[in-house]
Amino acid sequence: MTAVASPVRCVKSWAPVAAAMRRWQESSAGLQHVGTTRSSHSIPGARSCGQILWATELGDCKVGLAWSWTCLHGDVVVMTDPMRVTTNLALVDDESGEPLSASALMCCLNGVIHSLPWQDKIRAAA
């Protein structure tokens, strides 16, 4: 596994970034795997668990997404809680300019995460 400090703590230390949804959708294609950690504390019924960090540039700013993962039986890797993605990104609606609600932000971020090969990164390091 790529050694990084706690991915969640890394993202929380970055400056907040606000962006329109359309701009984020274009920039999210540049997301790169930054690192993965494995926890020494195991979840009952899981082989292993940890956190993963992906990041990209949005203009002159770094935007990160970090979340917890759990490896179940075999090669099954899942997000521990899809509604708990840590990010320094605040998305605003393209039309109204209003900030997205927390649940709408999570749905948008999960759509992006779904397109990333994040599970492969964890399987390869296991």
Image: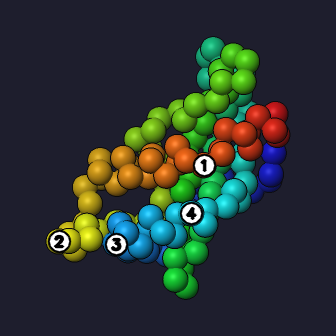
Residue drawn at (80%, 53%) of the image:
3
Identify the image quadrant of residue 38: top right
Going 54% across and 57% down the picture, which residue do you hit?
Answer: 65
In the picture, residue 33 is in which quadrant?
bottom right
Q: Residue at x 82, y 40 (%)?
A: 125
Q: Secondary structure at mark 1?
A: loop
Give the alpha-carbon distance from disc 2 to disc 4, as whole Å.
24 Å
Q: Earlier in the sequence, mark 2 or mark 3?
A: 3
Name the residue tied to disc 2: 96
- Label 2 vs 1, first from the N-terminus: 2
Mark sitting on residue 20: 3
Residue 64 showing in the rendered view = no
Furthest residue to the bottom? 60
Decide: is 119 above or below 52: above
| Residue kind at label 3, given as amino acid type | Ala
The amino acid beneath tag 2 is Ser
Compared across the picture, whether 62 is left or right of 99 comes to right
